[in-house]
Image (spheres, rainbow, N blue to C red):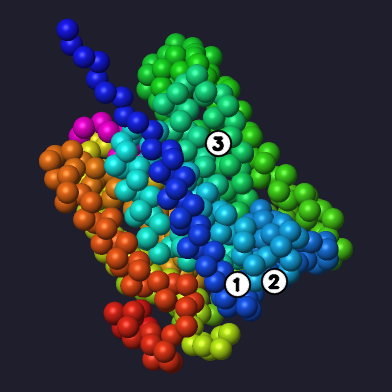
Amino acid sequence: MSRAPEQPVDPIHWCAALAFAFWVVVLWNLAIPTTPYFDEVHYVPAARDLLVLGEFSNREHPLFGKEMIALSIAVFGDNPWGWRFMSSLAGALALFATMRAVWFATLSRYATLASGVLVATGFHLFVHARIAMLDIFMIAALAVAFWQLAAAMREPETGRRRLFFAGITLGLAMAAKWNALIIAALPGLGFLALRWFAGRRRLLLSRRGMPVPGITLIEAFVWLGLLPLAVYWLTFAPGYFFAVNPITEGIVAQHRVMLDLQTQVLPPHNYQSTWPEWIANWRALWYLYEPADGAQRGVMLIGNPLTMLLGLPALLWCAWRGVSARRPAHGALALLYAVSLGFWIFAAKPVQFYHHYFLPGTVLLVALALALDDLRSAGWRRTAWIVPAVSLVVFVYFYPILAAEPLSGPMSFKAWAWLPSWK
């Protein structure tokens, strides 16, 4: 009598524990520096304006991220904790949701937990979970959306509910930063493509087949097309009630203003960089390096020098496996990386910075987790854990310069600025 195959055990408790541990580390000295730094000088005042509906400032960006900062200030006060607390929650949520997305996409405990360790120690998520910027809210919303999408495909009986939440979070991602616009369109386009190539005679009304059996193409258009746009528009509601510069000519006119501000020609910046430099992990971005709160402190944004480079061949592997072995999770990651990076290759934004690599870099780390999972399945079980373990060691070494810890003096940056371009 043959035995039924073992069913993998969902590591949800480990996912929660890892996300909680990450959040605790993020919260340590979250209020330092005690003054706004880097882009907080733009977003904290904009959040204050939102709270009193004074002047509609920082009009070049959508409102959702600033609304979250404003909510944090309303709850915790107009102080460093209030500015950044919601960012810390978004960072922990992004990590948990990323692991859940990987679990539903692969049913691999190793890939799920390895992706959590790699993303948590990849520098980008940690740095942005500790600063009042918009990027972390976009990443968190996208992570939740892909968690819900992967779960809908794995458990079609929950598909309608999952697609509903995915549509909401796709809208919130777009409403945090425009970087998410093209990514937010991919789920709906993917649904259409799968049904189209399945050759269904009733294309719009068929409930059969991938990606979510039981959901028609028309219903998917509602959840993944109309709902995100509605949520996106609703986040602009406060814009109509500002005392100064409110939205008076409609949402379309407001977007013309935003587009003009986004594409205006700006003077060169010392820390601007280009996409080839992002891929090579070549150009660091210093969010802070100055005396603050009684000590020399710094916050350097760069990718984990181990995993950002190992992730490049991992992406090629995922692209190959996606095509040759028809591994959808592998192929989806390669596509997500290409599209999210391609946005910046063709974007009409003259001055770009390394933090724009946050989304592609996160996808790259998940791709590395899947490549290591394949290595593990090939018999290299112990070797597959070396990379996450060393990634953690590298994170611990860089921690002082990621978390604005006290440094010994003005030249301390040399310990972490391994390349001249990191200075």
Looking at the picture, does residue 288 appear above or below residue 386?
below
**Mark before the other along the chain sequence, 1 or 3:** 1
User: Mark 3: which amino acid?
Assistant: Ala
Q: Residue beneath label 2, please?
A: 79
Q: Nearer the viewer, residue 189 or 14?
A: 14
Q: Is residue 385 above or below residue 350?
A: above
Please report the residue visible at 46 percent of the width from the left and 55 percent of the height from the top.
21
Q: Quadrant of residue 310?
A: bottom left
Of badges 1 and 3, the one in the foreground is: 1
Q: Quadrant of the C terminus?
A: bottom left
Residue at (29, 65) in percent of width and height: 393
Q: Nearer the viewer, residue 73 or 224?
A: 73
Q: Residues within 10 Å of mark 2 (few under 14, many from 20)?
A: some
Pointer 2 and pointer 1: residues touching (CB < 8 Å)?
Answer: yes
Q: Label 1, secondary structure: give it.
A: loop
Spatial CA distance of label 2 from label 3 is: 33 Å
Dominant secondary structure of the magenta stretch?
helix
Q: Which residue is mark 1?
A: 31
Q: Earlier in the sequence, mark 2 or mark 3?
A: 2
Q: CA distance from mark 2 to mark 1?
A: 8 Å
- Per the image, is 329 magenta? yes
Pick whichever, 320 or 109, lies toward us: 109
Residue 103 occupies quadrant: top left
Q: Of helix, strand and loop, which one carries label 3? A: helix
Distance from disc 1 to disc 3, alpha carbons, whole Å, reads 33 Å
Relative to 159, is 337 above or below?
below
- Give the percent coordinates (x, y) of residue 206: 49, 13
Which residue occupies 68% across, 69% down? Answer: 44
Residue under label 3: 166
